[in-house]
Each structure stands twice: as structure tokens, then as C-alpha cells.
Amino acid sequence: MKIDLHVHSSERSPCARSREEEQIQAAIACGLDAMVFTDHGRLVPQTHLEALNQKYAPFRIFGGIEITVEEKEDVLVLGVHDPALESLQWTYPTLHTFVRERGGWIALAHPFRYHSDIVIDIAQYPPDALEGCSTNVAVLNQPRIREAAQQLGIPVVCNSDAHVTHSFGVGYNLLHEEPEDEAHLVRILRAGAFVGVCAII
């Protein structure tokens, strides 16, 4: 299964230019099998996700969130649908603990985008993955990201970070098995049972 874990929609991310259904259609046209909406500070209601999955089956649509923590680092969270994710101001250690306690998955989005170094403590609070490829990952930073991930012993994910339809295809992740549901997807990701594929080299 080919899945993009980092997608935005204009309904929930003010910086996105393409609507939710346009993004889904673009992902399907690009040959993906699944995608995750990770809008800025906004969760997709579960009932809405269910409706989208019924409409676009067999294509799969999952819900996550992108949260900005202190010092301007962005973190992707999957597998947790607590409204507190939308309403609280998070420090990275607090968010990391919150996600871990609820069995979720956490990844640092586009490392080195805003700073020359990673400014949150990923050594003491290692995420499940680093994003090594997307429209907001500079090619020159890709080796540094892979090195950081190797030092932490965690995988690198490849995504589009699509805010508009033409961004799909930049990166995706090839899962070793097809998830039965979101909880299963999280287990696959936490086990590192996938290969990230990047078109920007």
C-alpha cells in the first residue's frame, strides 16, 4: 500500500489552497492507495472520515494532526483523536508524553526547515520517525535527516506535505502490509514496517 502521511486541506488548514475532495482525487490520480489529513491544529471528525472512506473506497483516508511546538518545530501525530490536541499550547515533551500514553505515533515534520539545527529534544524524547522528504524538505538537508534518524534508530518517512493538488508524488511510504484500521496503521508505522520513497533526489 502506498500512503502519504502528510496532507492538508483548505477546509482546516488556512495555508492550504486545495479543498479536501480535490486533494483526495489528486492522491488517487497519482497512484496512491491511502493518505492522512494532518491539518494544522485541526482534527478531522471521525464521522466525516467514515463518510469519506465510504465515498472513495477502496482508497483509504485517515486522520491525524500537525502541531507546532515551542521554537517553531512541527510535529505530526496519528492515532490520537483527543480534542486537547486542538486546544492546548504544547511543549514537545508534554506532547510526546501525551501521544505515547495514548498509543499514538509521532514524527518530526520537515526537520531543519526553520532552523539550522533541530531545536526540540529528540534525543531524550525520540519520535517514531523523521520526515526526510516532502515539498518542505530541502534536498541538501536530506542527508542530515537520514543521519539524525540513524543515530536515533528510527525510520525516515517520505510525504508530500501537499497544500495543493500538484504536490502529490513528491514522496510516499510503501507499507509492508495493508492496515485493517487506524490502530493497525499506527502499529505498522511504529514497527518501521515500511519503505519511504522520495522523488526528490
Image (cartoon, rainbow, N blue to C red):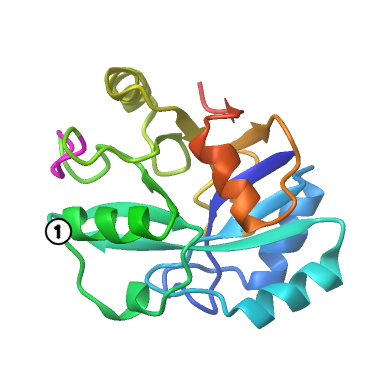
Circle 1 SS class: loop
On screen, 139 above or below 91?
A: above
Q: Residue at x 85, y 72 (%)?
A: 55
On-image quarter of the N terminus: top right
Q: Residue at x 38, y 37 (%)?
A: 137
Q: Position of residue 70 (x, y in %)?
A: 14, 59
**Residue positioned 33% across, 77% down in the render:** 84
Looking at the rendered structure, the kind of residue marked 1 is Glu
Which range of residues does the magenta coloring cover? Answer: 117-122
Query: 61 above or below 86?
Result: above
Q: Which of 109 and 141 is in front in this view?
A: 109
Position in image of residue 71 (x %, y %):
12, 54
Q: Which residue lies furthest to the front in this view?
A: 101
Q: Name the side, left or right, on which 11 lies relative to 101.
A: right
On whether residue 157 falls in the magenta region, the answer is: no
Where is residue 20 drawn, in percent x and y?
A: 64, 71
Q: Mark 1 points at which residue?
A: 70
* Residue 195 sits in quarter: top right
